[in-house]
Image: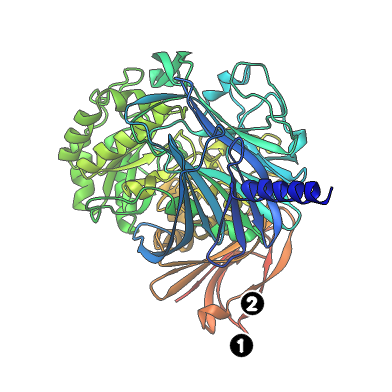
Amino acid sequence: MKKIFLSLAAALLAICASAAAKSYNVSSPDGSLVATVNAGGQLSWSLAKDGKTVLEPSFISMKLSDGTVYGAPQKVQKVVRASVDRQIPSPFYKKAQVHEAYNEMTVNFKTFSLVVRVFNEGAAYRFVSKSKTDFTVEAEQAEFTFPEDGQVTLSYVCQHTETLESQLFNSFENLYSTSAISAMRPDRIAFAPVNVKLSGCSVNITESDLRNYPGMYIYNGAFSGDGSLKVGRVTSENTLKGVWAPVPKETHQGGHNMLQRLVDSREDFIARASAGEAFPWRIVAVAADEADLMDSDLVWLLGKPSEGDFSWVRMGKVAWDWWNNWNITGVDFKAGVNNDTYKYYIDFASANGIEYVILDEGWAVNKKADLFQVIPEIDLQELVDYGASKNVGIILWAGYWAFEKDLEKVCRDYSKMGVKGFKVDFFDHDDQDMVAFMERAAKMCAKYKMMIDLHGMFKPAGLHRTYPNVIGYEGVKGLENMKWNTFEQFDCVTYDCQLPFIRMFAGPMDYTQGAMLNFQKKDYRPSNSEPGSQGTRAHQLAMYTVFEAPFTMLCDSPSNYLREQECTEFIAKMPTVWDETKVLCGKMGEYCAIARRSGSSWYIGVLNGWDARDMELDLSFTGAKQLTAWADGVNAEKNARDFSVKTVEIPSDGRLTIHLASGGGWTGIVR
């Protein structure tokens, strides 16, 4: 009997040892974050922070159209480990150098590899195919199973909501909704990034190095939805899962002014892939203090490094025409889309050191989707030459269909004319074809030394590192919505205080700030010709520091800026790329404070929600004794345009107390 018992015990130990050998760990450089790959059965991964579970084992796989499944039970061939610790120059970013430090584990199987990279602030994985020939991906499985029913904050798709599949056509703009994971809407998909609050930490989920693959939506897989997408089911209601758009099969021109691509039917697979394809990174950032999410470099670091010379890229500010409806005053010509009006914008930009003027929608003949049919009121060459004589570059707005149709000719001919770049709009999809086009467009613009601002599109996902001439992204419900949304439809101030924690985590935001007509909640109203903002003037000014935007709009009319030169000079002289970024404090939806350094000057920006508050800022890191501050005026609670500018003494301990009005803001400069 004793021999039988010993034999059984030995067998059990052998089984346990075998099972243990099928789990592989990799930790962050500081040892606080540990990722575990479980390869004993269906492939899964998990995460723990300081010994506490952040992600339960979460299934991951890719199914190819030939039936191959990356992630089905199969033998691990070998595990390769690597570590990186270096400084990377980043001249077009929110810091001049980025510290890249991670430990990496590559788990090799016969048909694919799984690469897991763990940083101090988060972890990411990607599949890499070993296929020798091209293939198609039928489906991907990316699950994020949490140890509790956490609080999720995300943006649901709010357009074309008849079915889950119809939601794939959207502008990636919506407010944030917060609920338990288990209480997520079964009739909606959401776009990344998303935030999940757990006991003791805050988690962001998104992706990077998205270049030839559809973008990832998020869905609660505990629901089956309406069956129009292959969303499937999972066993835990605490699980989020990725959803991807199938490849378009039939499309046609239509939509807004005949500038959009409308999908009529789709293939039964999500991507065409090349031999040896490396797929996008799936990112899980983990922060003990949610404020740390405002200064993550994970998405940028996981983007493919740029190649070639991009020293010609010139970031900066741009005077914008569309938001203020070309509404200028005190002139002797009819304001509108014409040369006289744009010369006025150019004169304003030149006088204030603003680098660019944009010609938004209207300069090309409407509904022709042809960027070479220019309306008779516009002489583009004359405007470009006039701008050049005043050191102001011209940026042209373009709808997707018109831009894609004549891509190289548009870039070549307008580059030769002297145009500096394009703001391309109305993409409204992130299926593989559209994602691939964006890289093709960035590459073509780079060929002709032109910049590109991606509007009407999804969140940043690494392309701005690969092509630094990608100078801006929308994927945000920006200030343009003040032209038509009531307060009941859009609480903009609260949204402003959520963005830095979630959307800005992914990268730059073309939010288009700078409103000079400002209103408290009770006074706000939408307007097309004289739009204004919710919150105070200081709230608007602080956005130029808080929001990451290397290509930053001045959204209001030059006539309004000229009436208040103090604010105009502040905005016009603001840097748009930085040498250093430092998070001071923040609570999602309530307030946030960020400091950014350019040269020897520190810029501090604070955004407040609707609750007035006093706040203490620790500015000891600046070593300064005083600063210049733009603050809410004493009457800002009544008149949101009230602000003050004054020199403020910093106490010897560096701790400065400031007051923030309802919907308020504060911004200071230490020179």
Q: Is 413 located above or below residue 294 in the figure? A: above
User: Could one spot residue 470 in this view of the protein?
Assistant: yes
Residue type at numbered disc 1: Ser
In contact (CB < 8 Å): disc 1 and disc 2: no
* Residue for badge 1: 652
Question: Local crowd at mark 1 within 10 Å, few (<14), some, or many (≥20)?
Answer: few
The answer to which quarter of the image holds residue 491 is top right
Q: Residue 418, image x and y in percent?
A: 19, 42
Residue at the spot 53% in from the left edge and 35% down from the top edge: 74
Residue 99: percent from left, percent from top = 44, 65
Residue 361 versus residue 263: which sits nearer the camera?
263
Q: Which mark is residue 377?
A: none
Label drawn at residue 656: 2
Q: Secondary structure at mark 2?
A: strand
In-front residue for pair 251/482: 251
Q: Residue at x 47, y 27 (%)?
A: 429
Q: Is residue 653 left or right of residue 338?
A: right
Residue at the (48%, 42%) spot, across then down: 126
From the image, which quarter does the C terminus lie in?
bottom left
Foreground pick, 548 / 97: 97
Is residue 400 rendered to the left or right of residue 477? left
Q: Is 489 situated above or below 101?
A: above
Residue kind at label 2, given as amino acid type: Leu
